[in-house]
Each structure stands twice: as structure tokens, then as C-alpha cells.
Image: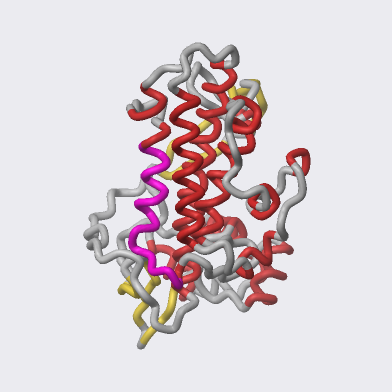
């Protein structure tokens, strides 16, 4: 049965519709109108596309099939804001989403409000014959929107990093420097290990079914690699030693001229990184992040 908590109450296992939708818009609060439409690379999407696509999900998978009196906000949005679900119709090319100067951001927010009103009505209908399927799809949609919240921040950060002004997304202070705990290693023996979702909480279909798989023995560190440790890798020629890199990684390094992790810049022998607060001096004790798989593999081979 659909619970009212799905609308406006959030628990550890069940996010509410209202809280998730509001969180997406809160993440956009620091943006100016000009920021909403920028697309800094083909793999990124404009902020306003994220706002619209997450609404398209609820409209397409819940309101159109289950709300008999629902009237779409704009029929053309079905094509513009589908991402890649071919079974649900055609979609606009991902690499060209930044060309969509229209609809305006004002219209996108009106679209979200239109969908939210209809979804609230649907979720409070306790007599709907498909209420269990509605609940299932709503939970899927909320988790889907939370994924896009992460993508939204990822895409905003990349777009701002391309601006020579290096604007700050937020004025909130960065996390203060921390101390580095001693490094130790945990040993895992070879054998059969269970993998996959376990329990009754939400999971995507690619996290199931739970199954057993064999793995060789391995060790894993008790803490993440720090920026300072990764700097040692750079200083000792890590980006110039082909023997450390997988072949595809070495080809990518040379094609894209990698010399350090994404967002890092060296200024007068001191490393800085672009953050949500703008360019900042690198915290030597912070865990290193924005590494590609290839960089992580090369570092692991170097640290051996």
C-alpha cells in the first residue's frame, strides 16, 4: 500500500517525494540564469536538462500510465528530455543538449511544479488499483533523481572549471585539513564471496541477484591514498613511465596530455585544485580524488 510518508517524510530507507524534489532545486539555488544552460563537454548535461529529465521520468512512467486525468505540460518535452530509453520513444542527442536555449529555465521550473502537483494527487490516492506498482516506480524515480543530483554537481563543477574566472559554486567553507592516520593493510583470502544486493531495501536490477563469485587473495589499505602521497607519484615520473600504465591508459594520457589529476594545477611549485569554492591550495592530507581508473591503476602498480 502507498504510504503518505512517501510524499513528505524521509527515512533512512525511504526518501520522500517532496524532500528529494526539493533537494534538486536547492542544489540549483546558487546558479545564475546563465549557468543553467551550459554544457562543457558531450558527456555532461546542462543543469536545466537534469531538472527537466527527472520530471520527465515521473511524467512518463507514472503520470501518463496511472493518472487518468493527467494532461502533459508540453508534449514536445517527451522527446527533448528522454535520455536514452528507446522503448519510451525518441530522444534528443546528448552531445547537443547545450543547444536547447528553449524551453527557458522559467518554463522548466513550471514543468516541475506541474508534475509535482499531479504526483502528489496520485500518491495520495489510496484507492488506486495499481498502488503497489505506483509505489515501486516512485521509489525508482526518487533514487533516479538522487543519481542526477550527483550528476548535476559533477557537471556544474566541470563547467565552472572551464571558465577562466574560476567561479565558486558555493561560499560555504571547505572541509578543514585533517590528520592522516597510520597506513595499515587488511588481508582478504582467496575463495568464494557473496556479491550483490541483500535485504528488502531499494536496489537497482543490476545489483541483483546476490550470488557467489571467486576472487584471488588481495590486500586493501585501511585508509585512502592522500594528495601528498599522489604528489610523490607525480614527482617520481609516474606520468612519464609507460611501464606503470595499462595500454589504453597510456594512449589516453598521451592523447589528452595528462600530467596530474583532473582539476589540479601547479603554481610556483605548489599544487592547487579547483573546488566548489573555487581554486584552492591543495590539502596535502586530504584523500586524492578525481582520478581515472587508469591513474589509480598506475599509482597502485607504482606503490606496489
Whole-percent x and y of residue 25? 39, 51
Decide if residue 228 is in sight here. Answer: no
Left or right for 26, reference 133: left
Viewer-closest of 146 and 303: 146
Residue at 59% x, 38% y: name it.
71
Whole-percent x and y of residue 14? 41, 26
Left or right for 208, reference 25: right
**Please, is residue 16 above or below residue 159 in the view?**
above
**Please, is residue 23 above or below residue 100 in the view?**
above
Seen as rendered, the residue at the extreme bottom is 268
The image quadrant of residue 253 is: bottom right
**Please, is residue 68 above or below residue 298 in the view?**
above
Viewer-closest of 72 and 280: 72
Decide if residue 165 is in sight here. Answer: yes
Viewer-closest of 60 and 96: 60
User: Is residue 93 on the magenta stretch?
Assistant: no
Left or right for 82, reference 263: right
**Please, is residue 62 above or below residue 167 in the view?**
above
Residue at 50% x, 11% y: name it.
127
Q: What stretch is highlighted in magenta?
A: 19-34
Amino acid at each position: 500500500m502507498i504510504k503518505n510518508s512517501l510524499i513528505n517524510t524521509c527515512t533512512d530507507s525511504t526518501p520522500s517525494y517532496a524532500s528529494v524534489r526539493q533537494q534538486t532545486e536547492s542544489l540549483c539555488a546558487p546558479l545564475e540564469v546563465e549557468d543553467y544552460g551550459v554544457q562543457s563537454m558531450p558527456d555532461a548535461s546542462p543543469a536545466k536538462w537534469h531538472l527537466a529529465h527527472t520530471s520527465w521520468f515521473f511524467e512518463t512512467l507514472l503520470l501518463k500510465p496511472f493518472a487518468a486525468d493527467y494532461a502533459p505540460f508540453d508534449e514536445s518535452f517527451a522527446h527533448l528530455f528522454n535520455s536514452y530509453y528507446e522503448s519510451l520513444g525518441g530522444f534528443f542527442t546528448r552531445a547537443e543538449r547545450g543547444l536547447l536555449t528553449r524551453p527557458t529555465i522559467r518554463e522548466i521550473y513550471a514543468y516541475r511544479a506541474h508534475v509535482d502537483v499531479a504526483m502528489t494527487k496520485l500518491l495520495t490516492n489510496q484507492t488506486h488499483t495499481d498502488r503497489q506498482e505506483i509505489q515501486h516506480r516512485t521509489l525508482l524515480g526518487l533514487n533516479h533523481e538522487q543519481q542526477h543530483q550527483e550528476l548535476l554537481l559533477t557537471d556544474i563543477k566541470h563547467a565552472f572549471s572551464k571558465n577562466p574566472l574560476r567561479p565558486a559554486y558555493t561560499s560555504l567553507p571547505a572541509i578543514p585539513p585533517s590528520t592522516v592516520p597510520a597506513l595499515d593493510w587488511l588481508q582478504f583470502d582467496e575463495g568464494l564471496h557473496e556479491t550483490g544486493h541483500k535485504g528488502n531495501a531499494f536496489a537497482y536490477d543490476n545489483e541483483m541477484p546476490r550470488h557467489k563469485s571467486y576472487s584471488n587473495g588481495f590486500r586493501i589499505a585501511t585508509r585512502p591514498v592522500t594528495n601528498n602521497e599522489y604528489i610523490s607519484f607525480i614527482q617520481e615520473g609516474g606520468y612519464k613511465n609507460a611501464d606503470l600504465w595499462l595500454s589504453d591508459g597510456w594512449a589516453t594520457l598521451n592523447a589528452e596530455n595528462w600530467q596530474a589529476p583532473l582539476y589540479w594545477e601547479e603554481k610556483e611549485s605548489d599544487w592547487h585544485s579547483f573546488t566548489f569554492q573555487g581554486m584552492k591550495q591543495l590539502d596535502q592530507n586530504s584523500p586524492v580524488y578525481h582520478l581515472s581508473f587508469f591513474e589509480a591503476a598506475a599509482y597502485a602498480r607504482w606503490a606496489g
